[in-house]
Image (spheres, rainbow, N blue to C red):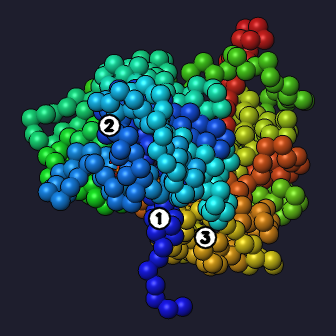
Amino acid sequence: MPIQVLSDDLASRIAAGEVIERPASVVKELVENSLDANSTRIDVHIVGGGAQSITVVDNGQGIPADELSVAFERFATSKIDESSDLISIGTLGFRGEALPSISSVARVEAISKHIESDAGARYLVDFGKSNAVEPAGAPQGTRIEVVGLFKNVPARLKFLGSAGRELSRIQSMLASLALVYPHVAFSLSADGRERLRTIGSGKLVDAVSGVYGAKVADQMLELEPDDSTAFYVDGLISSPSLNRSNRTYMTISVNGRWIQSRRLSYAIEQACHGFLPERRFPIAVARINTPLGDVDANVHPAKAEVRFLREDLIYSVVQRAVRGVLSASAPVHELGAGRAAGSIGLLRAPGRTSDSTAAGSIDASPSLSPSQKSGFTQWPEPSTVVEQSILPDTDADLTGAAATSTPKETLPVLRVVGQAHETYILAEGPDGVYLVDQHAAHERVMFERVRERFDQNASESQPLLEPATIDIGPGSMSTVQEHLDELNRVGWGVEEFGTNSLIVRSVPASLATRASGDGAGQVFVRVLDELSEGGTGETWRNRMLATIACHSSVRAGQILSTDECKDLIRQLEKVERPNTCPHGRPTIIQLNMNDLEREFKRR
Ligand code: ADP
Ligand code: MG
């Protein structure tokens, strides 16, 4: 093909690809325009996750009728001109790319009335085809409706998630903007149902209440800004008893601008270390203030990444502010309190042998490779085999052996009674009755095993008989490339296969029996989903390993034979942290003897 200049239409569709990745990006661009127009109220309506329609209505300054069509031209902006200093731009948009990009991949109708004119105007651009501007009655402000997003770009349409998933991206993005702009009243409705509403009082705690509810707002602690320097941070963080299972509840702004920064979220996360359970995250709004010249916003066209001149300084300012308030609040941990009484009604322990309080748990079941069905001893460790051969195989003699073979951990010596609800292993121990969550327990076992292999660079990989082809989002491809070494090291064999597709040729060996063909692809997609959340070094590695462990583990609802139960308990005894799964859920709960006796009025 000879070299030729791209047509405007094609050029803007390519540009659209950079700015507009999904419905949430449209909402972000439109809402940022509304903010730049000094709106004090912004209402967003979504239908079908945004793929069907997105409407943003504001009460800002509006667009003059004679500029309405210009706003949709590429590089048309009212926000900078030749004399602007690109380093210290105060507005959110400034490239003049959003409206032309969106209108090249959707049907966009804009109705606006400028603050200084008496009448409004309407302008329609239908997948790049413009129409005449017409007069229209309208209140002051701008209303932009986007219908049929990506209808003319099937490749992109294919990569959208379900309506629910796209909606949740929109919601969490809008939540962040509402938190960063507490003086603006935001609302979001989806398919007619209200999802979020803030009152725009200017108080951050009111915005938190509108976004996360009044109960959450009540439990937020104030970061104390040390505003003696030009760099400081203020905002709110949840008290440690209130936490979440993912990072999407941390909102960060710099000089009033919402940003996404893995490094700064990580700084907050680190500062919470020791105050929150493993893998739990705070709800937080951190508003960072720096001298304007210290930030460069002109880095990424769509993602709200910024570059700091003195990143380490900001990192430590954030950490200090968060740690300061958490230490000051110093919560009392309630561990394991009052757990038994309420749960007693659930228990039906068949044939309880009342005197065998110290029964051994290493039940030396002779079969080390139980049925493939549950598969949790697929890869017995060499040490297991050795121990097996030196253990006597009667229950009574095992107590001592159990004690010596049980490493530093705190798991009590357990005797398996049976399985309940195909989900819990029922056992008795020295101080009562225990329920073990079979999935959580196995997940812990698999996690430590997979991690050890990974650390020793000894992970096994299992080729798939039929390699699986999977489609992944454009964002995920860079995650794969960035972490290819670690992915290979844990046993994934993947290759790029065209744009945004991958072939999975081999899988971590622990997954082999559980995930074949499409299954393997699905697990890989789950791993990427987890990882696209970000994180660095150790957290990244652990999350990848935890996802693999999860999918290598026996599930709830799976019938286990008594031998399999015993085997699982025996494996659990050997791990470093038997009491929780890698995600921090308990693996085991106890109904202690005293409580039982009291409940049965034995004393
Ligand atoms: P940018 O925001 O980078 O300037 P856009 O394509 O997003 O580019 O918007 C182009 C122009 O249209 C803006 O500079 C602004 O003048 C005008 N505009 C867009 N949306 C609004 C709005 N909601 N209210 C007032 N003016 C708007
Ligand atoms: Mg804009």
The tag on residue 350 is none
Q: Which image quadrant is residue 413 in?
A: top right
Would you call the spot at circle 3 few (<14 residues within 10 Å), some (14-19), or many (20 or more)? Answer: some
Q: Amino acid at mark 3?
A: Asn
Residue ID for mark 2: 37
Q: Amino acid at mark 2?
A: Ala
Q: CA distance from mark 2 to mark 3?
A: 37 Å
Q: What residue appears at the point 31 percent right and 46 percent down from the top-left corner? A: 92
Looking at the rendered structure, the secondary structure element under dot 2 is loop
Looking at marks 3 and 1 on the same chain, the residue that comes earlier in the sequence is marked by: 1
Q: Is residue 83 visible?
A: yes
Q: What residue appears at the point 81 percent right and 24 percent down from the top-left corner? A: 347
The one of 304 and 512 positioned closer to us in this rendering: 304
Q: Vertically, is 481 above or below 384? A: below
Q: Amino acid at mark 1?
A: Ser
> Does ligand 1 reach within 8 Å of label 2's beta carbon?
yes
Residue ID for mark 3: 500
Which residue extends farthest left? 228
Assign the C terminus to one quadrant of the image. Answer: top right
